[in-house]
């Protein structure tokens, strides 16, 4: 009973935000041998200290929502840190990410819908994404589309104003004499 009284007094003082010497904050404590600070997945270094879905967003072609959905489909705890993952869990996540349609991820969730060449729908990652974007821009340039020409010139493509913004390293208007 004495322990129970001390515990309730401690909890009530913590809830009132009074300074006390017995309280402490919890930290992530994982044995060093099991924790990886850097994971190498799909030619990308992942930070092991961040949670799994947000760590996987550093891979090109994977956003936050897709990463969370992939964790759910692979039965991986999204609250885990990426460094705590076992090799089997990483393999399962990679299978879901590379073959999302086999795991019943809907087509509207994927980043390449109705491909120009074969009409397929897929999730493009890393090098495939870069290659397909480059091919799309080259096709638009070859067809002399307005969008392709703007990409070629390095101008804004989506109708933004260009008079005063987006100049990059070009001239900055009239320079005044000092």
Image (spheres, rainbow, N blue to C red):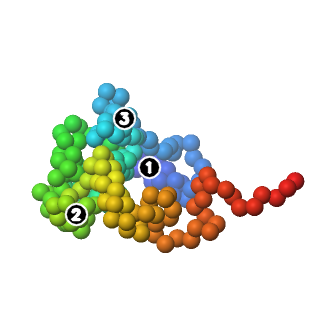
Of labels 2 and 1, earlier in sequence is 1
Q: Quadrant of residue 165?
A: bottom right
Mark 3 residue element: strand
**Whole-number angstrom distance, CA of label 1 to CA of label 3:** 40 Å
Residue occupied by mark 1: 7
On the question of residue 1 being in view, the answer is no
Of labels 1 and 3, earlier in sequence is 1
Q: Is residue 88 above or below residue 151?
A: above
**Whole-number angstrom distance, CA of label 2 to CA of label 1:** 66 Å
In the rendered image, residue 167, in percent from the top left (x then y), is placed at: 60, 59
Q: Residue at x 33, y 42 (%)?
A: 82
| Numbered circles on residues, count | 3
Q: Foreground mark, 3 or 2?
A: 2
Residue occupied by mark 2: 116
Q: Foreground mark, 1 or 3?
A: 3
In the rendered image, residue 123, in percent from the top left (x then y), is placed at: 24, 56
Q: Residue at x 23, y 42 (%)?
A: 90
Marks 3/2 in contact by CB < 8 Å: the verdict is: no
Q: Residues within 10 Å of mark 1 (few under 14, many from 20)?
A: few
The residue nearer to you, when weighing 76 against 147, is: 147
Q: Which mark is residue 122?
A: none
In the rendered image, residue 84, in percent from the top left (x then y), is placed at: 30, 39
On the question of residue 93 being in view, the answer is yes
**Whole-number angstrom distance, CA of label 3 to CA of label 2:** 37 Å
Q: Residues within 10 Å of mark 3 (few under 14, many from 20)?
A: some
Q: Is residue 75 above or below residue 162?
A: above
Of labels 3 and 2, earlier in sequence is 3
Residue occupied by mark 3: 38
């Amino acid at each position: 009973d004495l322990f129970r009284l001390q515990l309730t007094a401690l909890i009530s003082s913590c809830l009132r935000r009074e300074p006390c010497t017995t309280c402490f904050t919890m930290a992530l404590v994982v044995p060093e041998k099991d924790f990886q600070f850097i994971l190498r997945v799909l030619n990308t270094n992942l930070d092991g200290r961040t949670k799994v879905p947000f760590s996987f967003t550093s891979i090109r072609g994977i956003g936050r929502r897709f990463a969370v959905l992939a964790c759910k489909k692979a039965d991986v705890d999204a609250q885990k840190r990426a460094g705590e993952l076992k090799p089997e869990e990483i393999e399962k996540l990679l299978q879901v990410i590379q073959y999302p349609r086999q795991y019943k991820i809907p087509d509207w969730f994927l980043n390449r819908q109705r491909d120009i060449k074969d009409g397929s729908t897929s999730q493009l990652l890393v090098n495939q994404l870069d290659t397909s974007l480059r091919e799309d821009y080259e096709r638009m340039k070859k067809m002399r589309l307005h969008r392709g020409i703007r990409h070629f010139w390095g101008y804004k493509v989506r109708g933004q104003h260009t008079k005063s913004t987006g100049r990059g390293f070009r001239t900055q208007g009239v320079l005044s004499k000092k």
